[in-house]
Image (cartoon, helix red, strand yellow):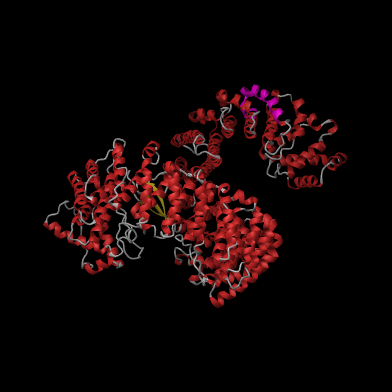
C-alpha cells in the first residue's frame, strides 16, 4: 500500500494557497490542504492574479476525462480550468472555497490531463503553471493508487514521456524544478513490491542529464535524485559506483556553485535513505569532506539547505560522520561562532553538535575539547536579549520566541546536558556560570541563572552534591536590582524544586519559602511577582505535607493579602497576571496541606466564588478557569463535610458554565479546567454526583472525541508549513515527513482522564455511559497513523504520549461498571475491547504504553475468566507473546554487541542498563498475561502454552541474567499453581533449576524459587513429594543465613518461611514437622510479603485451633510469643480486617482473655503499640 494521508484539515496542499480562512471544505476522495503549502513561494502570485484573473460568471463543469493531447475543442475547454487555477489563489475566501469544491469534483484522470496541459502551456502565467505543477505532484502523492493504475497504458506512457520532455524543454527554472518534483513523485510510486522501477526511462534520463553540458539538466537530475534517492530500486547495488562518481563529479564542479550545493544535498539524502546499510555508509564516507565543504560555502552564499541536511545526518545516521567527526564539529563550531551569519544559520550549526550529543553521545564524548568550546557559544546566545522597558509590567505572557538566540541557546544547553551527562557538562559550564553571575551587565546574570535552570535535569547527580552552594548563591539574586534577573532567580528556584524534589524541599524549605514570599511582594514588577508565585507552585507541588504545615499560617497570610490586592487591581485596572498565578498557588498549597487547610477555607472561598461569578469577559477566561480549578482542589483537600455548605453554589456556577459550553471557542482555556473540576467534584460528592452526569457527559465526550489532524508530506511542503502554528513533524526518510497538529490534544487527554475517573468513582452508577465510552476509547488503542509509517517514527509523535495510559486503565474499570447489566452485555463489551487490545500488544512501539496495555489486558482476562478468549484470540496472542520473548533475547544480544563497540564507555553502559530494565519490565507483563490465562483456563490451556515452552525454559538457564531467571521461574510457578497435576509433565524442564535457584546469589531468584516450592506442596500433587522433601533443608539454609533479614534479602527469606509452612501443612509427610515447627514459629511474623503472611497466619490458626502441643508449648508457655506475633502482624498491616484469618486470630485472643492469669502473662510482655494493636483487632474482627 502506498503512503497516504488519513485526515487533512487546515494544512497545506491541495494547494490553493491564499487567505487566512481555515473553514475549508474537505473532499474525502481528494483531500486538500489549502493556504499553507505554497504561501511563502507564491506570496506575490496573488497580487498578479488579482490583476489578470477575475472570478468567472460561472464555474465550469468538468466531467469527462480528456485525452492527454488536447484537440482544438478541448483546448478551448482548457481555458476555464486556467481560470479555476487562478481562483484557487484568489484572496476572496468565497471564490476560493467554491473553486476548491469544483476542483474536488473533477475526475482524477481529467485532473492529470488538465494539469499537465497547464504546466506545459507557456502562454499561461508562470504562477498558474506553478500551481498546476504542485497540484499534480500532490495528486500523485495522495491519490496515486486510486487514479494512476486505472489509466490506459498509452496514457501512462504519455505522462512519463511528457514529464521528461518538459524537464528538457522548460526554460523557467522554477517550473523545471517543479516538474522534476512530479517526476520524482511518480518514480517513488512506480517502484513495485520487488523493488523494480517500472519507469526505466527515467534512469536513463538521469544518467544522460548528469553528464550533459547543460547546467539546467544537471541540476534537474540531481534534484530528482535528491527528492527520491531510492529511484534505482533493486538496481541500486549494481549502480553504486556510478552513483558515487556522479555525486563526486558534481560536488567538484567549481564553475557552478548551485550544482555543488545540490550534489551535496543529494549525497546527504542518499546517505539518509540508506541509514541502516553500514557497508554502504562506509563506502560513501569519502563524500563527507565534500558535503562539509558545501556546507561552509553555501552558508556564506545565504543558503542553509546543506547545513540542514547535515543536521539530518547527525540525527538519523550519526555514525556516517565518525571518520570526519573532528572536521564536522570544528566546522559547526566555526559557523556557530560567526556573528556575520544569520541567527538561524548559527543555531543550525549548533544543532549539529547538540543533536550528536543525543544520537551519538559516546562518539561525541571523545571530542570533549570541542564540546567545551561549544558551551560558551550557547551561553553567548543566551545573553542575546533585548532591552524592554515594558517587560516587567506586561500583563500578557507571550510564548517563547523559539527562533531567538536566547531560547535556542538555553534549549541547546538543556539537551546537551541530558545527552552527555553531568559528569562531562557540569565541569565545563560551572566556571562560566559563576563568572556570568558576577557580571555587572544584567543580561549575563540573567543568562547564568537561566543556564542553571537548563542543566538541572542532565546534571542532576553532580549538582545534587553541591546543591547547598548553588541554592545559597541563587537566592541572593532574588534581591538583584534588575527585575529580569530576579525573574531568572525565581525560574531557577522553581526548576530546581522540580528537578531535585523532594530533596530540595527537605533541605531548603525555610530559605526558599521566605525568599519567594518576599519576592512576591514586589508590587512594582508584576511579572516578577507572578513568576515568584509560579516558583512557589513548583515548590509546594512536591513538598512533603509535614514540611509545609509549619509554614501554612505565613503562606496563607501572604497569599490572601496579595489575592485581595490583585483582585482590587483587576477591578480598577484590568490587570490579572499575578492574580492568575496566586490563585494557582493557593490551589497548590491546599492540595499539599489537605485537611490542614480547613481553618483557611472560609478566608478564600468567598473571593474565589466572586471571581468565577464575575470574570466572564473573554480576556479573563484563563483566570476564571484557574479559579474553578482552585475551588475544586480546595474542596477535595478539605473534604466533603467542610465543602458541602458551598457545594450547591459551586455546582450551580459550574452548571452555568457547562450550559454555555457549546458557546466556548475551541481554544478556550476554561474547557480543560472545567473538565478536571467536574472530576474532582465527583470525587468529593461520590454517588451523589451521578445526578449531574447528563449535564457533564455531553461536552466531555465531545472533547474526548477530538480527532487529531495529521498529514503525510514531502519535505518541501513540510518546510512551507512549519510556520503554521501547532504542527509538529517527524522525518520518515525518503523526503517525507509525518505531521500532526497538537492543538486540542491536551484537552482530549484531560477529558479521557476524567472519563476514567467517573468510571472509577461511580462504578455501576456510570453504566449508562459505558457503551459510548468504550466505543470512544477502544479505537484510540490503534495508531492514528498510516500503515506504512514506521513505529519508530510513530513513537516520536506527540499523539502517542497523549491519552494511551489513561484509556488503557479504563478498560477493566469499564468492564466492572458493565457487570451490573448482566453477563451478556458484559461479554459483548469485552469482545469489542479484546481484538483491539491484542492487536495493540502486537503493534505498540512505546515500551511504557505497551507495558500498560499488557497489564490492562491481563486484568481484563482475570475479570472475565474462563471462555473470554476464542481460538483466534489464542492463536494471535500466542504469536505475539512468542515474538515478545524472541525480541527480548535479540535485544540482549544487541546490547552485548554494543558493549564491544569502539564508542562503549560507562555512560553507554548506563543507557544499556536502562534499555535492559525496559525489556525486563515488558517480560514481567508477559508473565502477567500468562498468569491471568493460567488462573482463568487452568490445565486445558497447556497445549497452547507449549509453543512458548522452550523460550520460557531458555529464560531459566543458569547463564541468563538474574531477571530472566526470576521471571522464567515465576511463569513455571503459575503453571504448577494453576495447572497441576498436569504441570508435572514439564517437570524435567524446571524442577532441577528451581531447586538449584533456592541457593541463587540473587534474592529475587531465590524468592521465585521458594514460592514455587510452596505451590508444589499446596497444588502440585503426589508427583512433587520427593522434591518438597529435597527442598526443605535448602529453604532452612536460606532462612538461617546470617544476612537473611537484610533489606535486600527479606522478601526471599519470607517466601522460604512461607514455603516451609506450606510443606508442613499440605505435605507433612515430606518434612520432620516435630523438629521444624519450633523453628518455624521463631521465624514469624512475616512483615514484608503481605500475601505470604496471610498463608502463615492461617496455618498458625490451624495449629492453635487444633491445640498443637509444639506450637502452644508446655502449659501454653508459647502463648506470649504467639500474642507478640499476632500484635506485630497487626502493627505491620500483615493482618487486615478483610482477611479471614483476622477473625480466627481475634477468637484465639478472646479465649485467652477468659483466663485471667494467662491473659495478664501474655499482655504484660507486649509494648504499648502491640497492646493497642490487639485491642484494634478485637474491636474490628
Residue at image position (48%, 37%) is 869
Q: Which residues are magenta?
A: 1016-1038
Q: Nearer the viewer, residue 844 or 1016?
A: 844
Foreground residue among 1142 and 1133: 1133
1024 in magenta:
yes
Question: For the image shown, how many numbered marks are present on the structure?
Answer: 0
Q: Is residue 818 visible?
A: no
Residue 441: image location, x then y, percent: 56, 66
Is residue 495 visible in the rendered image? The answer is: yes
* Residue occupying image coordinates x 48% and y 63%: 399
Query: Magenta span has 1022?
Result: yes
Looking at the picture, how far across and down is residue 712, in whole percent?
A: 36, 51
The quadrant of the picture occupied by the N terminus is top left
Query: Given the current orientation, which residue lies at the most extreme left position?
Result: 72
Left or right: where does residue 533 sit relative to residue 119?
Answer: right
The answer to whether residue 276 is above or below residue 357 is above
Q: Position of residue 1031 (x, y in %)?
A: 67, 25
The residue depicted at 35 percent of the width and 65 percent of the height is: 21
- The quadrant of the rendering that contains the C terminus is top right
Prevailing secondary structure of the magenta residues: helix
Residue 710 is situated, as x and y percent measured from the top left of the image, at 39, 53
Determine whether 1158 is above or below 1032 in the image: below
The residue furthest bottom is 572
Amino acid at each position: 500500500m502506498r503512503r497516504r494521508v488519513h485526515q487533512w484539515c487546515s494544512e497545506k496542499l491541495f494547494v490553493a494557497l491564499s487567505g487566512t480562512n481555515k473553514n475549508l471544505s474537505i473532499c474525502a476522495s481528494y483531500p486538500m490542504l489549502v493556504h499553507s503549502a505554497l504561501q511563502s513561494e507564491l506570496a506575490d502570485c496573488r497580487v498578479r492574479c488579482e490583476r489578470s484573473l477575475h472570478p468567472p460568471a460561472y464555474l465550469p463543469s468538468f466531467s469527462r476525462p480528456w485525452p492527454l493531447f488536447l484537440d482544438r475543442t478541448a483546448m478551448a475547454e482548457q481555458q476555464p480550468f486556467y481560470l479555476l487555477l487562478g481562483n484557487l489563489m484568489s484572496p476572496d475566501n468565497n471564490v476560493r472555497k467554491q473553486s476548491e469544491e469544483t476542483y474536488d469534483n473533477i475526475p482524477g484522470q481529467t485532473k492529470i490531463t488538465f494539469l499537465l496541459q497547464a504546466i506545459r502551456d507557456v502562454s499561461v502565467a508562470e504562477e498558474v503553471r506553478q500551481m498546476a505543477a504542485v497540484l499534480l505532484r500532490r495528486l500523485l502523492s495522495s491519490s496515486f493508487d486510486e487514479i494512476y493504475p486505472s489509466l490506459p497504458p498509452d496514457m501512462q506512457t504519455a505522462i512519463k514521456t511528457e514529464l521528461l520532455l518538459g524537464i528538457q524543454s522548460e526554460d523557467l527554472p522554477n517550473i523545471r524544478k517543479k516538474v522534476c518534483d512530479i517526476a520524482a513523485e511518480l518514480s517513488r510510486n512506480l517502484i513495485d513490491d520487488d523493488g523494480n522501477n517500472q519507469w526505466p526511462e527515467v534512469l536513463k534520463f538521469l544518467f544522460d542529464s548528469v553528464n550533459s553540458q547543460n547546467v539546467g539538466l544537471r541540476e534537474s537530475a540531481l534534484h530528482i535524485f535528491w527528492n527520491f534517492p531510492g529511484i534505482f530500486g533493486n538496481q541500486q547495488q549494481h549502480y553504486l559506483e556510478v552513483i558515487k562518481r556522479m555525486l563526486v563529479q558534481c560536488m567538484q564542479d567549481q564553475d557552478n556553485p548551485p550544482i555543488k550545493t545540490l550534489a551535496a544535498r543529494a549525497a546527504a539524502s542518499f546517505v539518509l535513505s540508506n541509514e541502516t546499510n553500514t557497508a554502504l555508509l562506509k563506502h560513501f564516507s569519502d563524500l563527507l569532506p565534500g558535503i562539509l565543504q558545501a556546507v561552509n560555502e553555501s552558508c556564506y552564499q545565504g543558503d542553509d539547505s546543506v547545513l540542514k541536511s547535515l543536521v539530518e545526518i547527525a540525527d538519523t545516521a550519526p555514525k556516517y560522520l565518525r571518520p570526519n567527526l573532528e572536521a564536522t564539529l570544528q566546522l559547526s563550531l566555526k559557523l556557530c561562532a560567526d556573528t556575520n551569519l544569520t541567527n538561524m544559520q548559527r543555531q543550525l550549526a549548533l544543532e549539529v553538535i547538540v543533536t550528536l550529543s543525543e544520537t551519538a553521545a559516546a562518539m561525541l564524548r571523545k571530542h570533549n575539547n570541542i564540546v567545551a568550546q561549544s558551551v560558551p557559544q550557547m551561553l553567548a546566545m543566551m545573553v542575546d536579549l533585548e532591552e524592554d522597558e515594558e517587560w516587567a509590567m506586561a500583563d500578557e505572557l507571550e510564548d517563547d520566541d523559539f527562533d531567538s538566540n536566547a531560547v535556542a541557546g538555553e534549549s541547546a544547553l538543556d539537551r546537551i546536558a541530558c545527552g552527555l551527562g553531568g559528569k562531562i557538562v557540569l565541569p565545563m559550564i560551572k566556571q562560566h556560570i559563576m563568572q556570568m553571575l558576577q557580571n555587572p551587565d544584567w543580561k549575563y546574570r540573567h543568562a547564568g541563572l537561566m543556564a542553571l535552570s537548563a542543566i538541572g535535569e542532565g546534571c542532576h547527580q553532580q549538582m545534587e552534591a553541591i546543591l547547598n552552594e548553588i541554592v545559597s548563591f541563587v537566592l541572593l539574586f532574588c534581591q538583584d536590582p534588575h527585575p529580569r534577573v530576579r525573574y531568572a532567580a525565581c525560574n531557577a528556584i522553581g526548576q530546581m524544586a522540580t528537578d531535585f524534589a523532594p530533596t530540595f524541599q527537605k533541605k531548603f524549605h525555610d530559605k526558599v519559602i521566605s525568599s519567594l514570599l518576599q519576592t512576591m511582594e514586589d508590587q512594582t514588577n508584576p511579572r516578577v511577582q507572578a513568576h515568584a508565585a509560579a516558583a512557589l507552585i513548583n515548590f509546594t507541588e512536591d513538598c512533603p505535607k509535614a514540611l509545609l504545615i509549619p509554614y501554612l499560617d505565613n503562606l496563607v497570610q501572604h497569599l490572601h493579602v496579595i489575592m485581595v490586592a490583585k483582585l482590587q487591581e483587576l477591578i480598577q485596572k484590568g490587570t490579572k497576571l499575578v492574580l492568575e498565578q496566586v490563585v494557582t498557588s493557593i490551589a497548590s498549597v491546599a492540595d499539599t496541606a489537605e485537611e490542614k487547610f480547613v481553618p483557611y477555607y472560609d478566608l478564600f472561598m468567598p473571593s474565589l466564588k466572586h471571581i468565577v461569578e464575575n470574570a466572564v469577559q473573554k480576556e479573563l477566561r484563563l483566570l476564571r478557569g484557574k479559579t474553578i480549578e482552585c475551588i475544586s482542589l480546595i474542596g477535595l483537600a478539605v473534604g466533603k463535610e467542610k465543602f458541602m455548605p458551598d457545594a450547591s453554589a459551586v455546582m450551580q456556577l459550574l452548571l452555568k458554565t457547562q450550559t454555555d459550553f457549546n458557546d466556548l471557542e475551541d481554544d478556550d482555556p476554561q474547557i480543560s479546567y472545567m473538565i478536571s473540576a467536574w472530576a474532582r467534584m465527583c470525587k468529593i460528592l461520590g454517588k451523589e454526583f451521578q445526578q449531574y452526569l447528563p449535564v457533564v457527559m455531553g461536552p466531555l465526550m465531545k472533547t474526548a472525541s477530538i480527532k487529531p489532524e495529521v498529514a503525510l508530506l514531502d519535505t518541501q511542503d513540510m518546510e512551507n508549513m512549519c510556520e503554521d502554528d501547532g504542527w509538529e513533524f517527524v522525518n520518515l526518510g525518503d523526503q517525507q515527513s509525518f505531521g500532526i497538529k497538537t492543538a486540542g490534544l491536551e484537552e482530549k487527554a484531560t477529558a479521557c482522564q476524567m472519563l476514567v475517573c467517573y468510571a472509577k468513582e461511580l462504578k455501576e452508577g456510570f453504566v449508562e455511559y459505558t457503551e459510548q465510552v468504550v466505543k470512544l476509547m477502544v479505537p484510540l488503542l490503534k495508531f492514528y497513523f498510516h500503515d506504512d509509517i514506521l513505529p519508530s517514527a510513530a513513537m516520536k509523535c506527540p499523539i502517542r504520549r497523549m491519552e494511551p495510559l489513561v484509556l488503557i486503565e479504563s478498560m477493566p474499570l469499564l468492564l466492572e461498571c458493565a457487570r451490573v447489566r448482566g453477563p451478556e452485555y458484559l461479554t459483548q463489551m469485552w469482545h469489542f475491547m479484546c481484538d483491539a487490545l491484542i492487536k495493540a500488544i502486537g503493534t505498540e512501539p512505546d515500551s511504557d504504553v505497551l507495558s500498560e496495555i499488557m497489564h490492562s489486558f491481563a486484568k481484563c482476562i482475570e475479570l472475565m475468566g474462563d471462555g473470554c478468549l476464542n481460538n483466534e484470540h489464542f492463536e494471535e496472542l500466542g504469536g505475539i507473546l512468542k515474538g515478545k520473548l524472541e525480541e527480548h533475547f535479540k535485544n540482549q544480544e544487541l546490547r552485548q554487541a554494543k558493549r564491544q563497540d569502539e564508542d562503549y564507555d560507562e555512560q553507554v553502559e548506563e543507557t544499556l542498563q536502562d534499555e535492559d530494565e525496559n525489556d525486563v519490565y515488558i517480560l514481567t507483563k508477559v508473565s502477567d498475561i500468562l498468569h491471568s490465562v493460567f488462573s482463568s483456563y487452568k490445565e486445558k490451556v497447556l497445549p497452547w502454552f507449549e509453543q512458548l515452552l522452550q523460550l520460557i525454559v531458555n529464560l531459566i538457564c543458569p547463564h541468563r541474567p538474574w531477571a530472566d531467571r526470576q521471571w522464567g521461574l515465576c511463569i513455571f510457578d503459575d503453571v504448577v499453581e494453576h495447572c497441576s497435576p498436569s504441570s508435572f509433565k514439564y517437570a524435567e524442564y524446571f524442577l532441577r533449576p528451581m531447586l538449584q535457584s533456592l541457593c541463587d546469589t540473587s534474592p529475587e531468584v531465590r524468592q521465585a524459587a521458594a514460592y514455587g516450592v510452596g505451590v508444589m506442596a499446596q497444588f502440585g500433587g503426589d508427583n512433587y513429594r520427593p522434591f518438597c522433601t529435597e527442598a526443605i533443608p535448602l529453604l532452612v539454609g536460606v532462612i538461617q543465613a546470617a544476612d537473611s533479614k537484610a533489606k535486600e534479602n527479606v522478601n526471599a527469606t519470607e517466601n522460604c518461611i512461607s514455603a516451609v509452612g506450606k510443606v508442613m501443612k499440605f505435605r507433612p509427610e515430606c518434612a520432620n514437622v516435630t523438629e521444624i515447627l519450633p523453628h518455624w514459629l521463631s521465624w514469624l511474623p512475616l512483615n514484608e510479603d503481605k500475601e505470604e503472611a496471610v498463608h502463615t497466619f492461617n496455618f498458625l490458626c490451624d495449629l492453635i485451633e487444633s491445640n498443637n502441643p509444639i506450637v502452644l508449648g508446655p502449659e501454653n508457655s508459647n502463648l506470649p510469643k504467639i500474642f507478640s506475633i499476632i500484635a506485630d502482624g497487626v502493627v505491620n498491616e500483615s493482618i487486615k480486617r478483610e482477611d479471614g484469618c483476622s477473625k480466627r486470630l481475634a477468637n484465639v485472643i478472646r479465649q485467652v482473655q477468659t483466663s485471667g492469669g494467662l491473659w495478664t502473662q501474655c499482655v504484660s510482655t507486649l509494648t504499648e503499640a502491640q497492646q493497642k494493636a490487639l485491642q484494634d483487632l478485637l474491636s474490628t474482627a
